[in-house]
Image (cartoon, coloured by chain):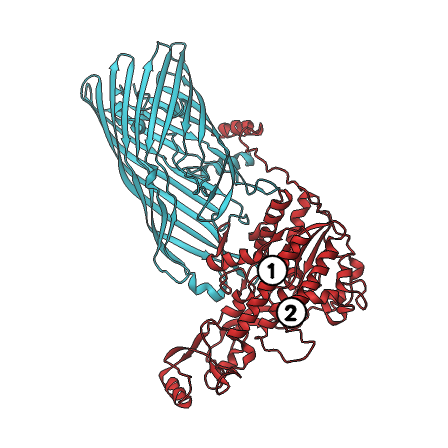
Chain colours: A red, B cyan
Amino acid sequence: MKKLYILGAMVCGLAACKPNIEPKAPERGDADFSRYLAVGSSHTAGITNGSLYLEGQKNSYPYMLAQQFRTVGGGEFKQPLVPGEHGWPKGKLMLGNVQGPCDTLPYLAVVPFRGALDTTGTHLNIYSQGPFGNMGIPQTKAPDYIVEGFALTNPFARRMFNKPATARPVEELLLLNHTFFTLWLGVEDVLNYAAAGGVTPPAANNRNLITSPALFSIAYDSVLNTITRNGAKGVVLTIPDVLDMPYFRALPAKSMELDLRDANRLNLKYNSTQVHFDVGMNYYLIEDKTAPKGYRQLREGEYIRMDVPMDSIRCAGWGWEVPMPAVWVLTADEIQAVRNAINSYNDIIFTLAKKYSVPISDVRYFLQTVQEDGTQYNGANYTYDFIQGGLFSLDGLHFTGRGNALIANHIINTINWHYGSSIPYVDANMYSGIKQP
Amino acid sequence: MKKRFLLIGSLLCSSMAFGQAYQLNMQGMRQLAMGGSGAAIPWDASSVFYNPGALSAMENPQVYASMNAVMPRTRYISAPTGTDMRDAEEQVFTPYNVYFATPVGYKTRFTAGFGIYTPFGTGISWANDWTGRYIVQEMRLNTTFFQPTLAYQITDDISIGAGFVYGIGNFEYRKALPLIDANGNEATRELTGRTSGVGFNVGLHVKAAENVHFGLTYRSQVNMKIRRGFARFNNVPNSISGSYINTAFESTLPMPQVLTAAVGWDVSEWVTLQLEANYTGWAAYDSLKFDFDNNTDMLRDEASARRYRNSITLRAGAKINFRNERWSVMLGTAYVPTPVREGYLDPSMPDAVHFLATGGLSWKLSKRISLVGALEYRFYEVRTGKSLEYAFKGKYHTKWLNPGLAVTYDFN
C-alpha cells in the first residue's frame, strides 16, 4: 500500500492530479479606479449598530469596493478610522439582557454598550493622515455640502476635513483628486424626519425637517458637478424606501396585548370614543392632535419606532392607559410625506445622473426585491427581519457588514455592466453579521 | 520510519469513502484496469459483485483481496475573474474488496461465494472558513456490503447466480450556521449516523460460443437507512441555544440500482475485448431528507432537492496476454455522464461528466498466486454551474488518480 501511495504521490508530483483551472484576471474596462472617492452619509461612513467604530468602518461598503478595485489597479484607500471598538460619539448597540421595573424576568433586548467608551482622542482632527477616500460623513444631508464651515456643526466632518472651519464639504471632496467615485446622498434628508417620528418642532434650522426637493436638487447638482469636474467616472445610488427597514417594522402596529380585565376596564374608560380594545393584540393608543379628543388608535399601515421605551409601555401605560406620544409613531400623513420625498429625490437623482452621464446603481429597487422575497448568498439567507434577517444591524436602519457586502455587489454589478469591467464580487460571508450573546 | 507509519496510518484512517457522485465502480482490479467493465467474462472471484452468474466458471476455490488508494482533487472558483479559489482538502480514500468463491463439491453445478466490498461512498472536505461553509464543510459517506452468493449452472453454457446484500455504512455531514456569538465565532451543525440496508444482486452468464460471453446483471437499489442519527450543534450563542438542541434524526440514503449488459470476445489466444453498458437508477436520489426528532422554531425537518438523473455509462476494455498468460496487460476507457442536473450542482458533490483512462498489469506469480495492479485516471470536464437552493455558483474541476492492487490465491 505504502509503495502504491508513494507511486501515486510521484505521479501527483507531476501535477497530473492537481486541478489547474484559474480565474481570469479582472479587467478595469473604461474606468480608472486608481483613486476612489466614496461620497455619502452614515451608510457610507460605516455606521452600524447605531454608532461609528473600527469594525464598522472595516465593514463599510466603500472599503469593500476599494478592496475589489485593487484587483483592477485601485490604489490605497484611506478611511478616517476611529481608534475604538465601542462606538463614537455614543456607545454602539448590542444584544443584552434587560429587566425593567415592571418586568418579572430579564429578557433579551437591544442595549447600548455598557462600560467606558474607548474614544480618547477621537474628536481630534486627523486630516494629516488623509486625504481620505471614504468621505462618508455621518448625519449629513445633501444641502450640508454647500454650507461653508459645516464641519463646525458635525463632529465627524470636523475630524477629517482639511479646513473644517471654513470649507464647504464639496471643496473637501476634491482633495483626493479622485479618478472614480460612488455617491450615495439623500438618505438622511428624509430618514432624520422619519426616525424622529415625523414630529418636528418649528425651529428654522431643525435637522429633522424633510429637505425640500428644490433644495435637494440644487445641492445634489452641486455635489455631482464637483466630483465629475475632473473627468472622474463613477456611480450614483438611489434612495431606498427607509420605511421598509426594521426600525419601523420590528414592532407591529397591532401588538398591544391586553387581558380581559384590562380590556374591559379600558373600554369603560374610553367609552363614547372611537377607542376600543379587545382581549389579545390591539392597536396602540396614540397622541394625534387632529383626532377629536387629541388621541386615537393606531391604524394598519402606520408605524411605531423600534426604539420606543418598553418600560414606558409596560409601566407608564403608553399606548393603552395613556396615549403614546406622537414622537414615537409615524402616522399615515407623515408616511406619505416620507414616501413623496423619496420619490422626488430619486426622480432628481435620475435626472441629474443623466445630465452628468453617470450610471445609476438602483439600490432602492434591489432592496425592495430583498424586502419582498429575501435573498440568498452562498447558502445564507438574508431578509428584512430584525436580527434573524442578518441584513440590518441592531439599529434597524444601517446594514451589517454582510448587508453592506450585498450593496457593494450590487454596485459592482452596475460598474461592470456600464464600464465593461470584470471586477469580482465581494464575498459577503466573510464580513460581520449580527452578534448574539 | 515515523513518517512511513504516519503514511500508513493516514491510509487506514481514511477508511473506504471518497468523492464525487457516490458510486465507486472499482470492485475488481482487472475490471477497473479495463475501464470498469467485467460483467461478461468470469475473471476471478470478484464475479461475486460483477456477475454472480459468472461464478459458475470457477474451477477451484479462490480468495481475492484488493485495495485502492483514491486521490480526488477538487478546485472551486467562485467567479470568472479575481483571485478567489479554493482547493478541497487533499484526501486519500481506500476502498477495498474481499471475495471468496468455491464450487460446492466435486463435479457440481453449484458455486458458492461471499463478498465484502465497498460499492458506494463519497467524501469531501472544505476549509472551515470557506465561503460555502453554510452549505458544507465536510461530507462523508462510506458503505460496506456483505453478499453471500450462489450460482447455478443450468447448461454448460448458461448459468445464473444470485446474492443477498446486507450493507452497513457511516454518514457524516458538517456545516456552519450563520449564527455568530459575541466573540465572532460561528455555530456548526454536525450530523452523524450509522446506516444499513438490504438488497440483492443477480446475474446471467451466457457463453454464446467458445470465445463469446454475454453477461446481464441487476443490482437492486439499497436504501441505506439512518434510524437514529445524531444532530449536534456547537458554538450556538447562549441566547438562542434553546432553538438548537442536540437531537436524533432519521434519514434514508438511496444506493441506486444498476442494470448491466456486457459482452466479451476472445479475439485470439492473446487478445480479449469487452464492452459494457450500465444503466444506473440515480433518480432514486431525489432529495436529501433529515427528519429531526425534536423540531424547534429554528430546526425544522429538511428536504434538500437533488433530483439526480438516471444515467448510462459505457465501458470498453482490452486484455493482451504475454508469455503463456503469465503476464497480461489491460487497458480500458469509459464515458461516465453525470447524474447531477444543471441547477443542482453543489459543493458537497460537485460531479461532472468524465472519461476514464485505465490500465493494469496482472502477473501470475505461481500456480496459486496472482497479482493485479491497476491505475485509473479520470478526465473530468470543467463544470460551471450553480445550486438554486443555496444560490451558490462557481466553477469546479476535479482530477482523480486511483492506483490499486489485488491478490488472488487459488486452492488448486
Residue B109 relative to residue B228: left or right: left
Q: Secondary structure at mark 2?
A: loop
Residue A189 visible within the image: yes
Marks 2 and 1 share the same chain: yes
Nearest the eye: A243 or B277: A243
Count all numbered tags in the image, as a single digit.
2
Question: Quick one: label 2, few (<14), some, or many (20+) residues within 10 Å?
Answer: some
Measured from the top left, where is residue A409 in percent x and y?
58, 51
Measured from the top left, where is residue A40 in percent x and y?
67, 60
Residue A125 relative to residue B274: left or right: right
In the picture, the quarter occupied by the N terminus of chain B is top right
User: What residue is shown at x 57% (from left), y 66% (from top)?
Assistant: A397
Measured from the top left, where is residue A209 in percent x and y?
64, 73
Residue denoted by label 2: A212
Amino acid type at mark 2: Ser
Nearest the eye: B244 or A63: A63
User: What residue is shown at x 40% (from left), y 38% (from top)?
Assistant: B121
In the picture, the quarter occupied by the C terminus of chain B is top left
Measured from the top left, where is residue B321 in percent x and y?
40, 12
Chain designation of label 2: A
Disc 2 to disc 1: CB gap under 8 Å:
no
Q: Earlier in the sequence, mark 2 or mark 1?
A: 2
Chain designation of label 1: A
Nearest the eye: A235 or A43: A235
Amino acid type at mark 1: Asp
User: What residue is shown at x 74% (from left), y 72% (from top)?
Assistant: A153
User: What residue is shown at x 80% (from left), y 65% (from top)?
Assistant: A167
Which numbered tag is attached to residue A347?
1
